Image: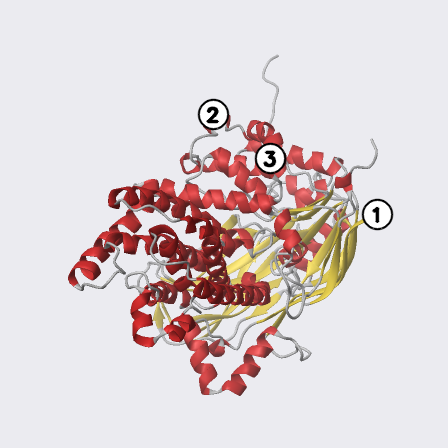
């Protein structure tokens, strides 16, 4: 048998790597199977551990919708762009619950993953990125419920639904970026995990989940709204509403600004993560 | 392919034990202190993770310093040394878990690190799912795990329960399954941190068998262990580390010998303790041979004594010394408490002052070997006021006449007792 390709003399040099490091994409692809199994573990473990299993993915958005509809829609009478409040909020809850869930889980990921990365080598960046993908399962389930809701309200989605993948991409980029920043900080500073839970609550109110973006536009004008688009979830949520509710045209400008912001957060997060990577084991 | 599997070149690893009060482990803390004095804080923090000074200030630890060696392809090499010698740090650097401070290492070939058995095992997942997860964590890819799955399960012996959640397994089953996954890795180089002492005797035998197979398979094995028996059996060469530096590299039997010698011979026959403010405290402990000289090598047939000097701060009742003699692995062989005095417990008063007590051991009782002394001061029977570890000593036998000379030391028994043998013929 002639020499096979896997008995290649693969030489690894281990030496101190000072300064800024870039992400080794080739390596991450090499470890894709590990990535897959870690995601599978996340999905299976969470659902096996809870009494209600997969139904949590339905309960969270549905119950939030009910409470918001009663308080904000009913009591406070917040306008909802002419759409019934429940479905107005639900459309925003689908991407929001994904984002906050992924961000929170990502923040914790290095802390809870301590057991593996202190014992075995693999590209550490996989750890905060795993929830970004595994939370898509919850997202999909929440989506399915949405179609039921649409049937109930007799609303059909627009052709804009084809643009959903772009929105999904933006939300994943933002979640990854926040996750890489926060997970690296959380393992160094023990007050971060608590702070993040609180932060994501505030971030929800900052995003147009329970209130319509048109309120902002009416009060402060178009440019202020566009600046607000620097918060990527603004573009994502408005985009979801446009795509699913035959409501307005797609908010391209907001999405564009949001994308730039998301990319910046993601790239800076990756750089920060890589720069702190070498001390994770020491502070874990 | 290169003949050298692992090349370690001038590898060093430094840890800075931080300036304790100023290490901020809260984000808020670090931000506020930065606001308060940005320049000095920046400098401090910058110093923590950079080592631009020569690093000889008091808060530096060199876990490894200038380590140099090569491992040939197919060699089974052991790493031995006391706790804190740097063995696990070396293993972690070669496993890429932590970065070296200076120097470099080159690894030629695929690597699998076994620092722990069952890394990543999740209790809610089934054995099957955990085999896949653990295999992937250890570096196998999916097709490899699928291919070896049946073999792995078979070796572990948990076939019947493979689809039950691992939280229902006994600890033995968990360990067998985990080891089984690790045993089926097929890297060029194996980096192992003493995970061999697992499972019951039958399984341990299987494991050692697998380790032997590994050695013969032509794979390079780098084994860190405290167990001199495994090192002696499995490794041809060994590296002895002491406080981060390479003390010796060579045949494993010689490395082991140097390691054992170091534990006893370099220790003094006299140990002194700093003053403390306990009501009674031990000042020095000395091991003296039959002529009253300090020595840690004691002739088997001769008597020896342990001399303890201690101080009592104020007149106290019922204060006594106790003495314990143990072997190196902690087995207690002699215990004498309360100075073995037959006095009534109450009304025994020692006035304040310094005391010297001499414990005499008759000769010819202890067998050849290494022993540890421990002294304690107690009031009544308990609680003990103070406990101190005294010097170690070795019993040696220079006389040629000892009838047990041909039996290896660890099989001779701790007591060197000559029993009274009485026989006579009982049928005529």
State which quarter of the image contains the C terminus of chain B.
top right
Secondary structure under the numbered disc 1 in the rendered image: loop
Q: Quadrant of residue B290?
A: bottom right
Q: Which residue is mark 3?
A: B145
Structural crowding at the residue carrying mark 1, measured as other residues with C-alpha within 10 Å and reported as few (<14), some (14–19) or many (≥20): few
Whole-angstrom CA distance, mark 2 to mark 3, is: 19 Å
Say whether disc 1 or disc 2 marks the residue closer to the N-terminus: 1
Secondary structure under the numbered disc 2 in the rendered image: helix
CB under 8 Å between discs 2 and 3: no
- Nearer to the camera, B180 or A170: A170
Q: Which circle marks residue B3 in the picture?
A: 1
Say whether disc 2 or disc 3 marks the residue closer to the N-terminus: 3
Secondary structure under the numbered disc 3 in the rendered image: helix
- Nearer to the camera, A128 or B21: A128
Q: Which circle marks residue B284 in the picture?
A: none
Q: For the view shown, which residue lies furthest in the top direction?
A: B428
Q: Residue at x 82, y 31 (%)?
A: A1
Camera-near label (2 vs 3) is 3
């Amino acid at each position: 048998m002639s020499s096979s390709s896997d008995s290649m003399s693969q030489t690894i040099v281990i030496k101190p790597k000072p300064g800024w490091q870039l992400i080794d994409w080739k390596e991450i692809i090499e470890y894709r199977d590990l990535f897959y199994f870690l995601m599978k573990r996340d999905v299976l473990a969470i659902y096996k551990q809870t009494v209600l299993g997969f139904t949590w993915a339905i309960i969270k958005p549905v119950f939030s919708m009910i409470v918001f509809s009663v308080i904000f829609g009913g009591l406070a009478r917040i306008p909802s762009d002419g759409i019934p409040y429940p479905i107005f909020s639900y459309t925003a809850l689908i991407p929001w619950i994904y984002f906050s869930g992924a961000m929170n889980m990502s923040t914790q990921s290095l802390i809870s993953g301590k057991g593996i990365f202190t014992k075995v080598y693999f590209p550490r960046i996989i750890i905060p990125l795993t929830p970004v993908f595994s939370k898509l399962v919850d997202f999909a389930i929440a989506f399915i419920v949405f179609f039921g809701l649409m049937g109930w309200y007799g609303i059909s989605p627009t052709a804009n639904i084809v643009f959903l993948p772009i929105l999904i991409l933006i939300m994943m980029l933002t979640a990854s970026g926040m996750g890489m920043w926060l997970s690296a900080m959380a393992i160094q500073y023990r007050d971060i995990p608590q702070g993040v839970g609180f932060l994501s609550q505030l971030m929800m109110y900052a995003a147009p989940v329970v209130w319509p973006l048109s309120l902002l536009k009416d009060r402060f004008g178009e440019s202020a709204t566009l600046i607000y688009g620097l918060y990527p979830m603004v573009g994502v949520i408005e985009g979801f509403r446009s795509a699913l509710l035959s409501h307005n045209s797609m908010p391209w400008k907001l999405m564009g600004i949001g994308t730039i912001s998301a990319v910046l957060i993601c790239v800076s997060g990756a750089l920060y993560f890589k720069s702190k990577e070498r001390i994770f084991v020491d502070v874990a | 392919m290169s003949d050298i599997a692992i090349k370690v070149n001038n590898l060093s690893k430094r840890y800075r034990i931080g300036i304790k009060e100023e290490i901020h482990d809260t984000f808020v803390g670090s931000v506020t202190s930065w606001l308060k004095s940005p320049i000095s804080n920046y400098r401090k923090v910058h110093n923590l993770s950079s080592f631009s000074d020569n690093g000889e200030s008091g808060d530096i630890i060199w876990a490894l310093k200038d380590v140099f060696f090569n491992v040939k392809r197919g060699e089974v090499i052991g790493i031995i040394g006391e706790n804190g010698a740097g063995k696990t740090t070396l293993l972690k650097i070669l496993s890429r878990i932590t970065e070296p401070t200076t120097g470099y290492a080159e690894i030629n070939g695929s690597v699998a690190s076994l620092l722990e058995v069952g890394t990543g095992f999740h209790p809610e997942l089934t054995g099957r799912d955990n085999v896949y997860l653990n295999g992937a964590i250890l570096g196998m890819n999916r097709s490899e795990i699928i291919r070896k799955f049946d073999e792995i399960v078979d070796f572990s012996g948990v076939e019947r329960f493979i689809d039950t959640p691992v939280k229902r397994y006994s600890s033995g089953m968990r360990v067998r399954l985990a080891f089984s996954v690790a045993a089926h890795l097929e890297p060029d180089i194996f980096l192992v941190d003493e995970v061999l002492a697992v499972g019951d005797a039958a399984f341990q035998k299987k494991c050692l068998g697998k380790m032997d197979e590994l050695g013969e398979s032509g794979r390079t094995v780098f084994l860190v262990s405290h167990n001199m028996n495994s090192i002696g059996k499995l490794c041809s060469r060994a590296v002895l580390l002491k406080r981060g530096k390479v003390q010796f590299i060579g045949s494993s039997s010689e490395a082991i010998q140097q390691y054992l010698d170091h534990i006893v011979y370099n220790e003094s026959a006299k140990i002194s303790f700093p003053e403390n403010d306990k009501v009674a405290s031990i000042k020095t402990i000395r091991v003296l041979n039959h002529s009253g000289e300090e020595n840690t090598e004691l002739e088997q047939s001769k008597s020896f004594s342990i001399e303890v000097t201690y101080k009592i701060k104020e007149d106290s009742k019922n204060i006594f010394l106790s003495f314990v003699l143990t072997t190196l692995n902690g087995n207690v062989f002699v215990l004498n408490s309360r100075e073995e005095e037959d006095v009534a417990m109450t009304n025994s008063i020692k006035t304040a002052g310094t005391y010297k007590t001499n414990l005499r051991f008759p000769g010819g009782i202890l067998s050849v070997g290494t022993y540890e002394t421990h002294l304690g001061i107690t009031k009544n029977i308990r609680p003990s006021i103070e406990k101190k570890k005294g010097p170690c000593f070795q019993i040696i036998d220079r006389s040629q006449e000892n009838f047990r000379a041909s039996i290896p030391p660890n099989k001779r028994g701790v007591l060197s007792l000559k029993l009274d043998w009485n026989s006579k013929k009982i049928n005529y």
